[in-house]
Amino acid sequence: MEKYVQIENVQMVFDTRKGPFVALRDINLNIAQGEFISLIGHSGCGKSTLLNLVAGLTLPSGGAMLCAQREIAGPGPDRAVVFQNHSLLPWLTCFDNVYLAVERVFGGSESRAVMKKRTQDALALVGLSHAEHKHPHEISGGMKQRVGIARALSMQPKVLLLDEPFGALDALTRAHLQDELMKIAADTKSTVIMVTHDVDEAVLLSDRIVMMTNGPAAVIGEILEVNLPRPRARLELANDSKYHQYRSAVLDFLYRRQLRPAA
Amino acid sequence: MNKILKILLPSVLGLLLFVGLWALVSQTSPQLPGPIKTWDSAVQLFSDPFYRKGPNDQGIGWNILASLQRVGIGFGMAAAIGIPLGFMIGRFDFLNRMTAPIISLLRPVSPLAWLPIGLLVFKAANPAAIWVIFISSIWPMIINTAAGVGRIPQDYMNVAKVLNLSEWKIFTKILFPAVLPHMITGIRLSIGVAWLVIVAAEMLTGGVGIGFWVWDEWNNLNVEHIIIAIFVVGIVGLLLEQMLVLLAKRFSYE
């Protein structure tokens, strides 16, 4: 298998006041180009920690991490992150929020007009051309999240990292954005790693679902390959027996084998 | 119409009550001039605010302007030094810990305690008064700007990290706009302090200025003018405050 993102024997130890806290250990994962991976597990299992490691926001305590044959030594625009709470800068318009990212990546090589076009294209991709001059506080939560996705995509990243991107949205908006993300990922052939706690979301979107055991010292418990043909349609899958098998496999892992002790 | 009345009615009522109480008190104490007497005196005073009859007898307008000028210079210098310093203290922890003891020590000092130092160093009353404004209005700006930098949501800094922005871009696109509301709060507090202090400082230094004017009228036993001065100081302070509230509204993002 082609290894676009390589995670080898990674472990993460945090220094806390009570001594070292092992969050992750023995993480091995190879991701192919164009693959859609979900990380799922109970709260506190370290799935966001793993995503932050790939993003380069934190560096691993042990092991090696490579993206496109290069070591991950810090954050970089080749690995764009969509945060759970959109993280748009409130004093910039939607256009300027995206343009900030475009300018960072292409500022050295492209003219203003080309970068402007890139920004508009990214906003068009998420269906927000009409809102480019609005400020974040003037648009809905779903729209903010879409601007966040546009910002990430505009950088033409090698890997798109999504940290529970739809967790804060209502169910209808979430479904809508999942469909859009699926379409965008297919159109742009993006490599995606998404943290989620939503079983349906994971099965619907992923090529593989990485299920993590409970922390501390979480490991990858199981990796489930989702062999559903693309494009996938939410409504048709509702009656698909394979879809339900995958779904129960994940549920089984989460609620029988990794049932969290009552908090 | 009805709505405006509802909003204005309590304030108008409050003011009327205040004037009524004042009139009542002035009835019982003959030295305190009542509202009507003060009003007549104010009309006369403001009919010619910009006259000059020698250095110690100038119109109320000149006195107000002289005070505003001192506040402007002292406050302006405090802002020019305090705001950048606040940014640096907020951004670099080492500098924060280095300056923390000095700031905690000097901040509670009564503004007028700085006046003798100013007189000693500058050997003149006017720069000494400006110095007092400077030193007493710099603290809120340093502290609020630094606190604002410290309180920037981690999300914004994560954006900066993920995009790998340069320090300059971080400053212009994230740090500065995020801190601006805190900075304006600091400026508001500073202007307030500066305007409070100038009256007291001018009473001691003399020359031209609303504070000196109050002291001068006290020596002339012109109590109406002292009361007018209190209102003038209050109204000018209120206007300065409102200006900055408007400015703050312009730069709030929510």
Image: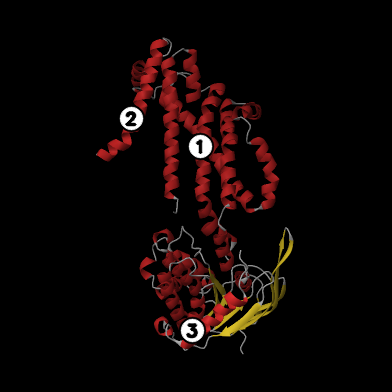
Distance Cα–Cα, label 3 vs label 2 = 71 Å
Depicted B144 relative to depicted A52: above or below: above
Q: Residue at x 63, y 34 (%)?
A: B108
> Which corner quadrant holds the C terminus of chain A?
bottom right
Q: To which chain does the residue with label 3 belong? A: A
Q: Which badge, 1 or 2, is on the more N-terminal residue?
A: 2
Q: Is residue B6 visible?
A: yes
Are the residues flagged by discs 3 and 2 from a single subunit? no
Residue that mark 3 sits on? A244
Residue A239 is drawn in which quadrant? bottom left
| Amino acid marked by disc 2 | Val
Q: To which chain does the residue with label 2 belong? A: B
**CA neighbours of label 2 inside 10 A, class few (<14), some (14 to 19), many (20+):** few
| Amino acid marked by disc 3 | His
| Amino acid marked by disc 1 | Ile
Residue A19 is drawn in which quadrant? bottom right
**CA neighbours of label 3 inside 10 A, class few (<14), some (14 to 19), many (20+):** some
Depicted A154 relative to depicted B241: above or below: below
Distance Cα–Cα, label 1 vs label 2 = 27 Å
> Which is closer to the viewer, label 3 or label 2?
3
Residue that mark 2 sits on? B12
Residue that mark 1 sits on? B191
What colour scheme governs how the chains and residues are painted in the rendered image of this protein? secondary structure
Q: Name the residue at the right extreme.
A: A19
Distance Cα–Cα, label 3 vs label 1 = 67 Å
Q: Nearer the viewer, residue A68 or B42?
A: A68
Depicted A146 relative to depicted A187: above or below: above
Q: Residue at x 57, y 40 (%)?
A: B140
